[in-house]
């Protein structure tokens, strides 16, 4: 067997090995993508379960904010009335 006969056979064997390795890597990538997809679905389900809690906290915060704004507005109006009465008393 000469070198001219041996090299094409060696190249074909190496190509077959390379093809097998690529197939194995492709299968492993598909398995990895399936696991990642399951993990992302699980994370999305868990995040979706927190959506109701976040909306509850948001509505609670909005209610408290509007309540505090009403209290502040009442206090400011009361102070303005007192100051206005004092100015009227001083003018008389």
Image (cartoon, grey):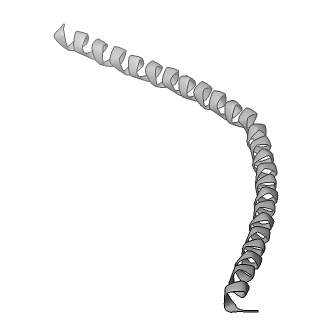
Judged from this view, the residue extending furthest toward the top is 92
Q: Residue 90 or 35: which is nearer the viewer?
A: 35
In the rendered view, does 73 fall on the left or right side of 4?
left
Q: Residue at x 79, y 41 (%)?
A: 45
Q: Position of residue 89 (x, y in %)?
A: 24, 11
Q: Residue at x 49, y 24 (%)?
A: 69
Q: Position of residue 90 (x, y in %)?
A: 20, 14
Q: Which image quadrant: the C terminus?
A: top left
Which picture quadrant has residue 16?
Answer: bottom right
In the rendered view, does 84 fall on the left or right side of 25?
left
In the rendered view, does 71 fall on the left or right side of 46?
left
Q: Which image quadrant: the N terminus?
A: bottom right
Which picture quadrant has residue 83?
Answer: top left
Q: Residue 43 or 80: which is nearer the viewer?
A: 43
Compared to residue 46, the image places residue 81 above or below, namely: above
In the rendered view, does 62 fall on the left or right side of 4?
left
Q: Residue 74 or 92: which is nearer the viewer?
A: 74
Q: Residue at x 72, y 35 (%)?
A: 51
Q: Residue at x 46, y 19 (%)?
A: 74
Q: Position of residue 78 (x, y in %)?
A: 41, 18
Which picture quadrant has residue 22?
Answer: bottom right
């Amino acid at each position: 067997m000469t070198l001219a006969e041996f090299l094409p056979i060696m190249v074909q064997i190496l190509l077959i090995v390379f093809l097998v390795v690529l197939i194995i890597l492709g299968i492993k990538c598909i398995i990895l993508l399936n696991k990642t997809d399951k993990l992302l679905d699980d994370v999305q389900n868990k995040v979706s379960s927190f959506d109701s809690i976040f909306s509850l906290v948001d509505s609670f915060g909005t209610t408290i904010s509007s309540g505090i704004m009403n209290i502040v507005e009442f206090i400011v109006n009361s102070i303005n009335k007192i100051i206005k009465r004092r100015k009227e008393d001083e003018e008389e």
